[in-house]
Image (cartoon, grey):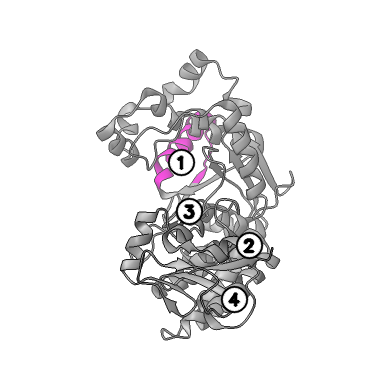
Amino acid sequence: MSLFSNLQKRGFVKQITEPENLAKILDQGHITAYCGVDPTGSSLHVGHLVPYLLLRRLQQHGHKVIVIVGGGTARIGDPSGKTETRKMLSIDEIDANAERLSQQLKRFLILDGKSGFLVNNAEWLAPLKYLDFLRDIGSHFSVNRMLSFETYKKRLETGLTFLEFNYQLLQSYDYLQLFDRYQCRLQVGGDDQWGNIVAGIDLIRRLRQEETYGLTVPLITRSDGKKMGKTEKGSLFLDANLTPPYEFYQYWRNVPDQDVEQFLKIFTELSLDEIHDLTRYQDERINHAKERLAWEITQMVHGEDEANACQRAARAAFGGEGDLAGMPTLTISQQEWDQGILIPDLLVRAGLSPSKTESRRLIQQGGISINQLKIDNPEFLVNSKLDLAVPILLKAGKKRRVHLMIESS
């Protein structure tokens, strides 16, 4: 199967310019492709991953890749996909975030300065002289055309600042710079970036009389209507301090049955034949495919040792085998355990509930238990007088578990 066909079958292709020409180049030649991310946060989340996994596949097939960490564009903020203006960050905050994101991206791509390059667009955007930029670059943009793109239409409903209006010019200028410096001819991005990508292609055609290409990946959603990568606590981050590896693993282990095949195609490097074998059953055997999905992507993001620990912990919590080393753990002193802890307080401390009020609601709905003991009283006191087997698992609903460790005095 050709590379381009494989990308299509895996669900990586949404919109594309010059599909016949680009398919031929990807299958028979070599191209340099790029994708950019603005360091407006301290960590990538799984929603960011799809275009970089596409770049990873291109690199594995001999194409060169470039990642822009947008230290320059982050000073303005991309209005794409947003209903309100982004919060402005200080230069120091942007630089710190850029370093963190750069380290995360190196887990997925070889950025050695030969087959892969990591660049910061502040290098060429920060020194720009505004009047020269407007004359040399801004003169090639039609305001009427910019306003025809869906991104700007939506933002006009809530208010689009002049600062944000410049973003498309800057992203297009990025593409021009990468074309001049690296002969980059393909920009990859989420589908909300289509207007910006097309504008960059048009700028290069006007100024360099050269053909370049654009490809967008679909914005992934779950079959249950939820945004992919969104949890009760917010986004599913790659930073282990923001989303612990066990929570990360459990997210994938518990995706709806209908999403397993799609996610295996996009987020793992298993062959299409192997994915078909894993997902051809829609009974309890689909759980094996979910476990494989969870292990594969956790291994890619956090490493094999962490993935194995998470798998063992999940099996111990839900199947009675394995060990709990990778499970979220709350350590309680022996003295406090003897005195007792009210169950709403314990749920909050364990991270299973954001507040005591929510804890009481969960208890009243019958969703809380300790091992096999169902808790139905919000005033229940958890202490050493309880006859509990070891290990002690505090459970919220069917999926969430925290291991209670009693620290001996």
N-term mark: 1 or 4? 1
Callout in the foreground (2, 4): 4
Q: Nearer the viewer, residue 338 or 236?
A: 338
Toward the top, the furthest residue is 131
Left or right, 393 with respect to 87, comes to: right
Q: Amino acid at mark 4?
A: Pro
Callout in the foreground (1, 4): 4
Callout in the foreground (1, 2): 2
Q: Residue at x 33, y 39 (%)?
A: 83
Q: Please state the horizontal and vertical placement of residue 127, each as a whole percent of the image.
A: 60, 19
Residue stretch rendered in magenta on the structure: 192-213
What separation in Å lies between label 2 and label 4 (alpha carbons)?
30 Å
Judge whether 284 appears above or below 269 on screen: below
Secondary element at image label 2: helix
Callout in the foreground (3, 4): 4
Mark 1 — residue? 197
Q: Amino acid at mark 3?
A: Gly
Judge whether 1 appears above or below 98 on screen: below
Mark 3 — residue? 47
Q: Nearer the viewer, residue 160 or 10?
A: 160
N-term mark: 1 or 2? 1
What separation in Å lies between label 1 and label 3 (alpha carbons)?
19 Å
Within 10 angstroms of label 3, few (less than 14), some, or many (20 or more) residues?
some
Q: Residue at x 52, y 42 (%)?
A: 212
N-term mark: 3 or 4? 3
Q: Amino acid at mark 2?
A: Met
What separation in Å lies between label 1 and label 2 (alpha carbons)?
28 Å
Q: Amino acid at mark 1?
A: Ile
- What secondary structure characterizes most of the magenta part? helix
